[in-house]
Every structure is written in C-alpha cells, then in structure tokens.
Image: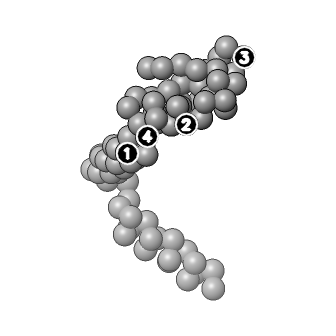
C-alpha cells in the first residue's frame, strides 16, 4: 500500500487518484494514518461484502429466535395502532 502525506496528496491529487485506481493509498497527517483512498470499484466491492455480512448476521439472529423484518414491522405497527 502506498502512503503519502496530506500535503503531498493535496499537491499531487491527480497522481493520488491514479494510484488509488490500482491500490489503496494511505494519507497521513502529522505522520499518522488519517484516511485511505480507494477506487470506486473497490468501494462497491466492500459495500457488497458488508451487505452480505449483515444479511448472514440477520439470518443467524432469526434462527436464534429474533424477529424477522416482517415480524418486527407487525409488532411496531401493532404498537402504533394501539397508541392511536
């Protein structure tokens, strides 16, 4: 992974973007990692992986006895109707 200072990132933003298309770039501030710049394609991959993870966790929770989305909505709707 490439690492650049925030000053260098600002001065060479085009280069930073080109590099981030190939690999993540860590930008440091005061010699400490501040942010990581990644391509939009890689970001989309990470978002998809996160969605898969949360879907798997939801399935595990449902198997453990937690309410499904539909059941949760029904309970909430029942509470709202009772208050009306």
Q: Is residue 72 above or below residue 82?
A: above
Q: Mark 4 points at which residue?
A: 39
SS of the residue under disc 1: helix
Is mark 4 in CB contact (under 8 Å) with mark 1? yes
Q: Name the residue under label 2.
A: 14
Q: Residue at x 57, y 78 (%)?
A: 80
SS of the residue under disc 2: helix
Q: Which of marks 1 and 2 is nearer the N terminus?
A: 2
Q: Which of marks 2 and 4 is nearer the N terminus?
A: 2
Q: Which residue is drawn at 37% across and 45% down?
A: 41
Q: Residue at x 38, y 59 (%)?
A: 67
Q: How many marks?
A: 4
Q: Mark 3 points at which residue?
A: 30
Q: How far apart are marks 2 and 4 (CA)?
A: 13 Å
Residue 77: x and y in percent read: 50, 77
Residue 49: x and y in percent read: 33, 43
Q: Distance between the residues labelled 4 and 1?
A: 5 Å
Q: Earlier in the sequence, mark 3 or mark 4?
A: 3
């Amino acid at each position: 992974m490439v690492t650049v200072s925030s000053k260098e990132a600002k001065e060479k933003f085009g280069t930073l973007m080109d590099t981030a298309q190939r690999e993540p770039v860590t930008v440091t501030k005061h010699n400490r990692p501040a942010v990581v710049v990644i391509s939009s394609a890689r970001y989309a991959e990470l978002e998809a992986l996160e969605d898969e993870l949360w879907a798997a966790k939801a399935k595990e929770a449902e198997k453990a006895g937690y309410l499904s989305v539909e059941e949760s909505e029904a309970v909430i709707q029942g509470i709202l109707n009772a208050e009306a």
